[in-house]
Image (tube, coloured by chain):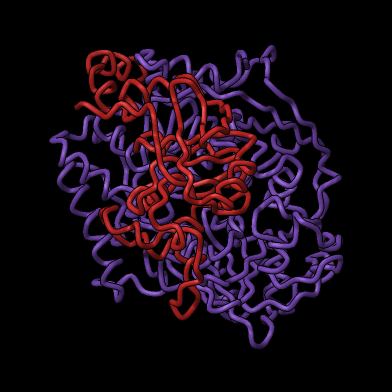
Amino acid sequence: MAKNTLFNKIWDSHIVKTLKNGQTQIFIDLQFLHEVTSPQAFGMLRTLNLKVAYPNRNFATVDHIIPTDNFARPFKDPLAEKMIAEIEKNCKENNIKYFGTDTGEQGIVHIIGPERGLTQPGMIIVCGDSHTATHGAFGSLAFGIGTSQVRNVLATQTLAFNPLKIRRINVEGKLKKGVYAKDVILHIIRLLGVNGGIGYGYEYGGSTIDNMTMDERMTICNMSIEGGARIGYINPDQTTFDYLKDRDYAPKGQDWEKAVAKWESFASGNDAVYDDIVNIKAEDIKPMLTWGITPEQAIAIDENIPERNAQTAEALDYMMLESSKPLKGQKIDIVFIGSCTNGRLSDFEEIAKYIKGKKIAKGIRALVVPGSMQVKREAEKLGLDKIFIEAGFEWREGGCSMCLAMNADKLIGDQLCASTSNRNFKGRQGSPRGRTILMSPLTAAATALTGKISDPLEIF
Amino acid sequence: MSLEKINKIRGKGVFVTGDDIDTDRIIPARFMKCITFDDLGQYAFYDVRFNDKNESLNHPLDLHRSSTILISGSNFGCGSSREHAPQALYHWGIRAIIAESFAEIFFGNCTTLGIPCIATKQAKEIALYIEENPTKEILIDIENKKISIEEKSFNFEIPETTRRALIDGEWDPIALLLESKEEIKKLEESLKL
């Protein structure tokens, strides 16, 4: 088993006790709640006549069902209205801080946690959402849980859990031009498989990761679950501390120095022992595209789609793609730029540099959806909204939008979507026959301009 | 709170073919606009059971409506952490799942609902046999880690903590967690700056 890693240090400091069934009861510093996976948990609490044990360690927002074209209440969709009303009621009744649509602080739960400074190193963080590993970018152990577990955390601020094995993933060197954090994680998932991470937590490190901004680190950790790993984390360093300083919920004054010293102590030691180590060279990574129906079905942009065989047939048929041909040049219908994977300010700043003064291809629809209201405000301060709108993109309010289509933003029929989100599953984007190609924001932007899957280096 | 001790599960099997069956497939997101889980059964695997016009595609789940043991391939339940997925299967009537392997969050969610996830490399062999003999009863013996279908028998692995939780009737750990109020309070204090 792993020794002296960040995982071991946080785990050991959070053990309440060993339960009769052999599982470990661990303390949860922070739980994030959203409208889809929490109402049933509050319902269960009521049935069991239990109270929320530590309301100030729970924070809520609304993201999945929110219509990003118009926040005006009541929502047009009565079911969406019912769900937002429910989380508002539950938070009010239980004294839980709720970042609502009228606060200016609403957004995708994995974007607003870090933004507000709630997400901090050394914490165990949970949420009823599998992309919770995003928060691991700060050197925390963060993972998605089911609704019954959301209930357990509300009632006790603890969970029954088993320790994980730890796989260190080293990425060394300088990324090529046009290659981004999204390409790195898609490369890793292709290499290790969608079930390669089962039983593991992923510790990402090496010079490539060390040189990344927090936004980029969040993109990497976000997709750990797509590789089967329940958690993914990066050791905290100066980049982490600089990001957190002066944020709303970050420690202030004397507490800040104390906090930084404590946070540093959680980082994996030089003598850390891992259950597995994988080494990747940054120079080997190219802009990536998924061609199939799982995130491991990915190729570099200059590769051909794999040949047809027993393993690829189902995906090729669903995606209506021809085997052994390039994916580059494939006509698309929709471009979606956003989500908890790539809906942060730096994602939009980067692509705005390239698309300024250009227009999206005729006949396609392209959406840019900020991950939060703060991202939206900051982007508008920089004038990015105008650049996108002038180029022909729709510019939206903060939310999950077309990543999972629990709102009005959906694919229709068998539309093909160039998407910066995290899942290309069958039907994921709202139409049972809808098709998704995952990629980085810049590749998506290049694709929007041509209407065909395009290599950003050839377009910009 | 006393829970049923889950030791032996009997039922007919239904084979849902494929690897990496994700939770979006098990319950498409558009059916998650709800505040209770009670009505989800009808939407289990909806988009592979019905076409665009809501016509039945004669999916195995519909052809074998009384089957309670679902059999599938590897990495079953990957993707989203939505408990809506195991809840939909539970409300459909599924009481155990046999697969080559399971995604972790799904495995934990199922266990907490008392749906054993039985991982065996022989899942496909079992599936083929059940496809040919859909009326044969499957017996899953959790305590002895054995699946029997008439004269055939298969071994499986299950984490010891899960095995014990099921056979001791402690698969939903809430009662155990609630016992440690004092210890939790002390630890909570110690974790503050």
Give residue B134's position: percent from left, percent from top. 51, 51
Give residue A406's position: percent from left, percent from top. 41, 65
Please tell me in which quadrant of the rendered image residue B161 appears: top left
Chain B's colour is red
Relative to A259, is A170 above or below?
below
Which is nearer the eye, A345 or A15?
Answer: A15
Which is nearer the eye, A178 or A223?
Answer: A223
Give residue A156's position: percent from left, percent from top. 26, 27
Relative to A300, is A260 above or below?
above
Residue found 22% across the figure and 56% down from its top? A86
**In the image, A165: left or right of B116?**
right
For the N terminus of chain A, the image quarter is top right
Give residue A268's position: percent from left, percent from top. 62, 19
- Residue furthest bottom as drawn: A362
Residue found 58% across the figure and 68% down from its top? A336
Please tell me in which quadrant of the rendered image residue A17 appears: top left
Q: Identify the chain drawn in purple.
A: A
Please tell me in which quadrant of the rendered image residue B32 appears: bottom left
